[in-house]
Amino acid sequence: MYNTLEMHILEILSDDARISAEQIAVMTGYDVDEVRRAIGRLEKDRVLVKYPAMINWERTDKEMVQAVIEVRVQPQRDRGFDAIAARIYQFEEVTSLYLMSGAYDLMVMVEAPTLKQLASFVSSKLSTLESVTGTATHFMLKTYKYGGVIFEGDDTDRRLAVSP
């Protein structure tokens, strides 16, 4: 489906989205124009959707409450889970939404400025949807690792020393 260059570009950008097309060209050995065209194709096909910065908000003054909500739903006839998922992901509090296997159907990741606002979202917006049959909310207390990056912990260099 996608060629070697495109797959290599995806791997490079998933590690650090700040890398330029020129740097990718040097890393891959391809011409910079070819790299730019490949990135354009990936963006057009919505494989590359966004270039986000990863921020440790706990080290800032920004106040927010984050939670993971397990949601059980009754899927709609002829539309399955997609229709209710589309309804839920429209809410501004929802940051991520996943269809799951197991004890619940959807995992909804949400954030709000205060606990009261997050509770209001669950009680007045999410729980009242006709397809929702139950929820379980889990509040995030601290982030240790996200997206493969360790946020808190020992910063010492664990590489082995190179000796002659």
Image (cartoon, helix red, strand yellow):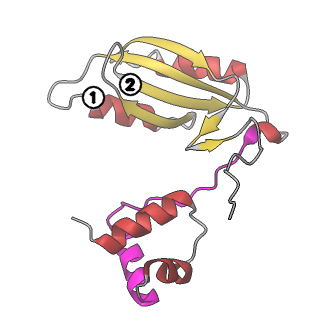
Which residue sits at x=77%, y=43%? Answer: 155
Name the amino acid, label 2.
Leu
| Looking at the image, residue 29 lies above or below residue 155 | below
Which residue sits at x=45%, y=15%? Answer: 128
Which residue is the site of mark 2? Answer: 106
| Looking at the image, residue 115 lies above or below residue 58 | above
Asked which secondary structure carries label 1, the reply is: loop
| Looking at the image, residue 39 lies above or below residue 117 | below
Which residue is the site of mark 1? Answer: 81
Name the amino acid, label 1.
Phe
Residue 121 in sight in this render? yes
Q: Residues within 10 Å of mark 1 (few under 14, many from 20)?
A: some
151 or 41: nearer the eye? 151
Q: Do the residues labelled 2 and 1 touch (CB within 8 Å)?
A: yes
User: Magenta stretch: residue 35 in it?
Assistant: yes
| Quadrant where the C terminus is found in the figure | bottom right
